[in-house]
Amino acid sequence: MASFMSTLKPHETQVLKSAIVSRLLVITLIIVWRILVSPYDTSAPLNPDCLTKTNSSTECSSETLLWPSLGSAIENGIVWDSVYFVRIAQCGYEYEQTYAFLPLLPICISFMSRTVFAPLMPFIGERAVLALSGYVINNVAFVFAALYLFRLSATILKDHETALRASILFCFNPASIFYSSIYSESLYALLTFGGLYHLIYGGNSLAVLYFALSGCGRSNGVLNAGYFCFQTMHRAYDAMFQKKHPTLALQIVISGALRCACIFAPFIAFQAYGYYNICDGRSPDKIQPWCKARVPLIYNYIQSHYWGVGFLRYFQLRQLPNFLLACPILSLALCSIVHYAKSMPKNFFSLGFQTSIEEMNSGVVFLLDDLSSSYVAGTVETSSVRIREDTNLQRRKKEIKENTVAVPIKSEAATRPRCLSAAVLPFVLHLAFMAGTAFLVMHVQVATRFLSASPPLYWFASYLMTFPAKYGRWGRMIWTYSAAYILLGSLLFSNFYPFT
């Protein structure tokens, strides 16, 4: 750990420390509230035998455990969706509704419990070991997610101070309780931020891998394919209309389609796995209706049938408290989107196709640099794609290492805040789609954690805090909102009370 810390730059070290402190704070609050408050639902320790297998030889009865009280305390923290993740890690997918929870986190939990934490089985029991594995995985993943967010922000914003502020905001974000519980938010954030970071640096293969794994952890991970769609759209336009090179444009489109297919592949494979287990080989009168659909998606059916998820289905008077609970994060998302659209209307509404020459010359349209050498950067197309990729990768690494941007002319693009640059557009569009989905389709209170891995939220909030004289009140409100939700979430969620 000490050697790893020594390789980090001062700002990265500060982010790492902030992430660790925030996780220790949340875990401490969970323990304190568990001691002081009686849980609303006391069913957390209940764990019936697995349906499809007998108990493993490593499982011990409560009478033979060496530290049964510690094991019981850990199991009491298995609440809400954590019950499903731990159960899947222990017993596999037994019931239809469990297929709403994608397999990445259960696989990681199962692996850790059978390797690193296997010696603890005789002391605290199998289920407690599974829960402990989940807690460790998610808290460690969160720390590295914060580090990736800082590096991503520093690259996009070209300002380490603003990037640092945005990363610290993420460390203390309103959905913090879920990043320290047995939920998939931490792994999703790590893989999303990591994928975006590698995408910016030209590591498309790594970006595809990260995004594909994010889709194996949360269903909305497949939306990360939108970044490649945006990249492909602009690069194909550049090749077709600027370079007059239709063959290159076709190559770009095919390459982008294959990358998107790879990102979707794990999620689709899991749907096929669900179909095979639930529908295959059963008589027509005994299978579920979704099995007969033209495109049988078990995930969509479960969300609709068991949880009532659907377009405008949550717009009921009795759900007003949940809309109020989601109001702060949705308001912040709306303000960040509207602020960008008002500041960059031509770029926003044209999806970046009318980006100014100054913006392009500043080197911020990073999504154009890959198979085709960009006319924007003033480079000449070479005969070797690999040479161009290596050159672009070295140039980007040099820029971020020196923390400088060469802008020959003091233009409007150079003086505009970097959170309003052309490079931010795909992130804003992604946030807009996510926020719209959370408001119109999902259980709206989930928006707090659903949007918590969206970088533009932290960039916009950091931008507000850069001008305390002008936006000081809004900055204080954001910090107050985060602190209140951390306290409220750690109290309610950990004691099995409804939160988000």
Image (cartoon, grey):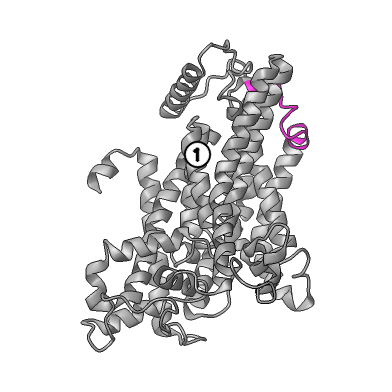
Task: Give the residue drawn at x 56%, y 48%.
Answer: 265
**Relative to 204, is 148 above or below?**
below
Q: Nearer the viewer, residue 142 or 491?
A: 142
Task: Give the residue drawn at x 74%, y 18%.
Answer: 241
Which residues make up the magenta segment?
A: 344-360
**Relative to 413, is 13 above or below?**
below
Q: Is residue 303 left or right of residue 57?
A: right
- Amino acid at the residue labelled 1: Ala
Circle 1 residue: 207
Q: Nearer the viewer, residue 358 or 272?
A: 272
The magenta stretch spans residue 354: yes
The image quadrant that residue 98 belongs to is bottom right
Task: Give the residue drawn at x 54%, y 11%.
Answer: 382
Residue 201 pos. (x, y %)? 48, 31
The magenta stretch spans residue 398: no
**Relative to 380, is 71 above or below?**
below
Q: Is residue 141 left or right of residue 114?
A: right
Question: In this view of the protein, can residue 421 be seen by the observer?
Answer: no
Residue 90 pos. (x, y %)? 39, 71
Residue 28 pos. (x, y %)? 37, 70
Task: Give the residue drawn at x 70%, y 46%.
Answer: 337
As helix, strand or loop, the secondary structure at mark 1 comes to helix
The image quadrant that residue 403 belongs to is top left
Question: In this view of the protein, can residue 7 be seen by the observer?
Answer: yes
Mark 1 Cα shell of 10 Å, populated few (<14), some (14-19), many (≥20) = many
